[in-house]
Image (cartoon, rainbow, N blue to C red):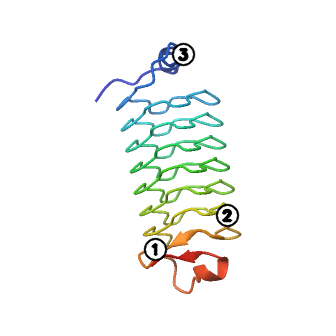
Amino acid sequence: MSSTMTETELLERYATGERDFRGANLSALDLREANLRGIILQGANLCDAILLNTDLIDADLSEADLSQASLQKADLTQANLEGAKLRKADMREARLHGAKLRGANLAEVNLSSADLREADLREVILCRADLMQTGFLKADLCGADLRGADLFQVRLKEAYFDGKTQFDPGFEPSALGMQHLE
């Protein structure tokens, strides 16, 4: 495994136009409010990283490990997080409009008040996630696992689900305006 890159090294290399940091070890780095638009962090280690209010629009974070990372108010619009590990991450008020999260592990994540409009959440694990007041307008939740998730005041109108989407017993997705796909 590569040695941990420093905040200064990453930001200086990014400022010179470098974008590809695949597999980099960025664990526990403080990158709050950084502009990392379009960065490639595929398979990178970002465990415990601080990414508060960070611009990650169009970033490639596929297969990255963001477990327990702080991503409050981060802008992940159109970002690729397919297969990412986000277990116990703090993503309150994060902007994930149109983000690709297929197959990501979001177990026990805090996504309260996050924006997941039109996000691809197929086969995502959202077990025991805090989804209070999260917006899922037109998000694709087909095959997702939402068992034990806090769905209090969640906005699921026009979100998609299928026969493989898992909810707690007694939860009626259609009553919240979700659309069943065959």
Depth check, mark 1 against mark 2: the one in front is 1
Residue 26 on image: x %, y %: 44, 30
Query: Is tag 2's residue or tag 3's residue first in the polypeptide sequence?
Result: 3
- Mark 3: which secondary structure? helix
- Mark 1: which secondary structure? loop
**Whether residue 62 can be seen here:** yes
Q: Amino acid at mark 2?
A: Met
Cα distance between the residues tagged 2 and 3? 37 Å
- Mark 2: which secondary structure? loop
Residue position for label 1: 165
Q: Amino acid at mark 3?
A: Ala
User: Residue 144's quadrant in the figure?
Assistant: bottom left
Cα distance between the residues tagged 3 and 1? 42 Å
Q: Amino acid at mark 1?
A: Thr
Query: Is tag 1's residue or tag 2's residue first in the polypeptide sequence?
Result: 2
Check the image and report above or below for 147 versus 46. below
Residue 151 on image: x %, y %: 63, 70
Q: Are marks 3 and 1 in contact (CB under 8 Å)?
A: no
Residue position for label 3: 15
Mark number for residue 132?
A: 2
Cα distance between the residues tagged 1 and 2? 19 Å
Residue 136 on image: x %, y %: 62, 62
Mark number for residue 78?
A: none
Residue 165 on image: x %, y %: 46, 74
